Every structure is written in C-alpha cells, then in structure tokens.
Image (cartoon, coloured by chain):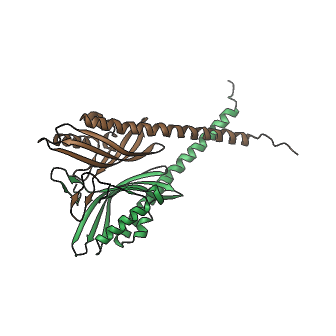
Chain colours: A green, B brown
Amino acid sequence: MKKPALTLASLLFVFCTSGALLQLRAQASAAADDKKQIEDLEQRFATAFGAKDINTIMSGYAPGKALFVFDVTPPRQYVGWDAYKRDWESFFAQFQGPASLTLSELSVTVVGTVAYSHSIQTGHLTAKDGTRTTLAVRTTDVYRKIGGKWLIVEEHNSVPVDLATGQPDLLSKP
Amino acid sequence: MKKPALTLASLLFVFCTSGALLQLRAQASAAADDKKQIEDLEQRFATAFGAKDINTIMSGYAPGKALFVFDVTPPRQYVGWDAYKRDWESFFAQFQGPASLTLSELSVTVVGTVAYSHSIQTGHLTAKDGTRTTLAVRTTDVYRKIGGKWLIVEEHNSVPVDLATGQPDLLSKP
C-alpha cells in the first residue's frame, strides 16, 4: 500500500480546523463569564435601587440614543439614556420614603456579544404620605457587549392588566 | 536586498485570513436577509391576528418549552408553546367579533443567529356584546435562528399603568 502523502492541502486543513476548535472552546468559557457579569449587573441594579442611587442604576444602560425602554408607567416609551434617567428621577420623587428591591427568577441567555434575560423585580416603596406599596415588575432586558462591558440596550418593564375589568395586577401574580 | 521567501507560515496566514474575510462579507449579506425574514414573520402575525388564525400565529414561536412570554393580561407569565397557544385561544374567546391588527414602529436588530425587536401592535377588537376596543400593545421580541428559521423565543407584551391613579393606558399614548 502507498502511504498517504502529507500534502499542503491537508496541512492547511488541519491548521485551520484546530484553530476553529480552540476558538469554540474559548467561546464556551467566555459565555459562562459573560453570564456571571450580567447577573452581577442585575444585582448591582437591585442594590442601587434600595439606595436610590440613580448614577449606579444608570451605569448599567447603554449611553446616548442606543437605549430603548418600555417602562411600567406612561408614556409609551423612553428613547435614550437621558430620557430614562429622568424617568428614574420622577419615579423616586413619587416614592420618597425607604425603598428596596428583590430580584428573582432571573434567567440570562448569552449568544456571543448579545444576551437577553427575564426576571421579576419586586420593589418595596414608600410614598410621600407614608403609604407603602409593593410592586412586582416583569422585566425583559437585552444586552450588548460594548467596549468589553455588558450594557442594557433594550428594557421592557410591566405589570399585567385584566382587560375585562381594566384593573392592573401590581403584584404580577403567577 | 534579499527577497522575502514565501514560507509555509505566510501561506497558512493568507489562506486562513482570506477565508475569514469571505465569511464576514457573507455574514453582512445574511444579516440583511435575516432582518427581512423577521419583518415578514411579524407581518404574517399581524395578518393572522386579523383572521384569528391561531395556527399561523403560533407558527412564529419556538416549539416546546423554549418559549417564554410576559403577556398583557394575567397571569404573570406563560412558559412553553402550548401554554401560550391557550392564552391566544382565551383572548379570541373574549373578543369574538371582527378583529384587525396594525403593526407600527417595528425596529429589528440582528446579531448573528439572535435578534431582537420592539414594536407597537394596535389591535381593533370586538367583544361578545358588540363593544369595540382599541388596544395599543408595546411588544418586545427576542428571536433565535433555529434549523434555518427565525422563531420568537421570548416575548413581552404590555400597556403602561399610571401608579398614582392605578389606571392602565390601553392606547399606550406616546
């Protein structure tokens, strides 16, 4: 039998394929790190909410016009970082007493440099007159890795509304 | 001067790099096609809504447990294709008269095999007693390309709620 020759073509094939495999392995490890970074981002948000620290809250969102948000409250939408910051300012102006936020049911999926999550964000709030409110918000976030850092580019926050009675369910009951 | 030798290493470099460049160009063209496919999916949904064709509506969603939805109405969430299909059945049971849906402000972003969009989906509905309702829903969708076909894996539908008055805004006014 003739020995197969080590041709240039087979060398090229092996070289490029092994490179691709190494890259795939590196990607899997990076995806696990990325998921952890996004979970940390959401936990930082929850802590900052309790401290009413709007600067830390806003550090998790994409700058400029890259951000798009459907929020719990009117109006329809917020386009851009500045607009959403003003939304947070008016939110905490409405609830001036102590606040806290519990993050639960967080599910994050990372695909390369884009990721998405859903979670329940239960806020405990105190209005100007001392009235306490619990608000369980359903949140969907879309993230992009921008300059090595994960940032929220789209957010959708809501509570469900019963169309037959016209009543919202502020606890988003399961 | 000595002429540079065409080494095996430089051959390997040129071969792998040109392959990567061709791949990048193909990806850009594919992304434009992908965006069009997703816009078509959303338009098919809008038409199927008007025909109350639940099978066509559901053909745009990922099968099995891969689907996760926060919908306009309670309960909190729908996990899986079967659960969301039942949600659509009870929705159209509530609005038995003529229906139509206008899709507007659709913005789709494709990143490889994942994509996300936001849009306003304005439904014109007729209840059992003949009462007509207009409902402008804010929709966020996340899509994955599964077996060569784009499908919705996460959806979030809502209308905003004024927390001071407890009233929803069924028109999601801008």
Q: As rendered, which of B166 and B37 lies closer to the eye?
A: B166
Q: Residue A75 at what x, y percent from top left?
A: 31, 58
Residue depicted at 26% across the width and 36% down the height: B50
Look at the picture and state if A150 lies above or below A50.
above
Which residue is farthest top?
A1
At x 53%, y 37%, the residue is B29
Q: Is residue B164 visible?
A: yes
Residue A70 falls left or right of residue B100: right
Residue B162 placement (x, y as % from top left):
25, 61
Q: Tag count in the figure?
A: 0
Looking at the rendering, which quadrant does residue A5 occupy? top right
- Residue pictured at 31% horizontal, 43% vertical: B65
Return the x and y of residue B104 as percentages of the image width and height. 35, 44
> Quarter of the image holding residue A8?
top right
Q: Residue furthest right?
A: B1
Of B93 and A110, nearer the camera is: B93
Residue A36 visible, this orientation: no
Residue B8 or B105: which is nearer the viewer? B105
Quadrant in which the C terminus of chain A is drawn: bottom left
Could you say which is closer to the camera, residue B130 or residue A138?
B130
Taking the image as shown, residue A101 lies to the left or right of residue B1, namely left
| Vertical side of B145 occupied by A62: above or below | below
Q: Position of residue B40 (x, y in %)?
A: 39, 36
Vertical placement of A108 versus A47: above or below?
Answer: above
Of all residues shown, which one is farthest toward the left?
B129
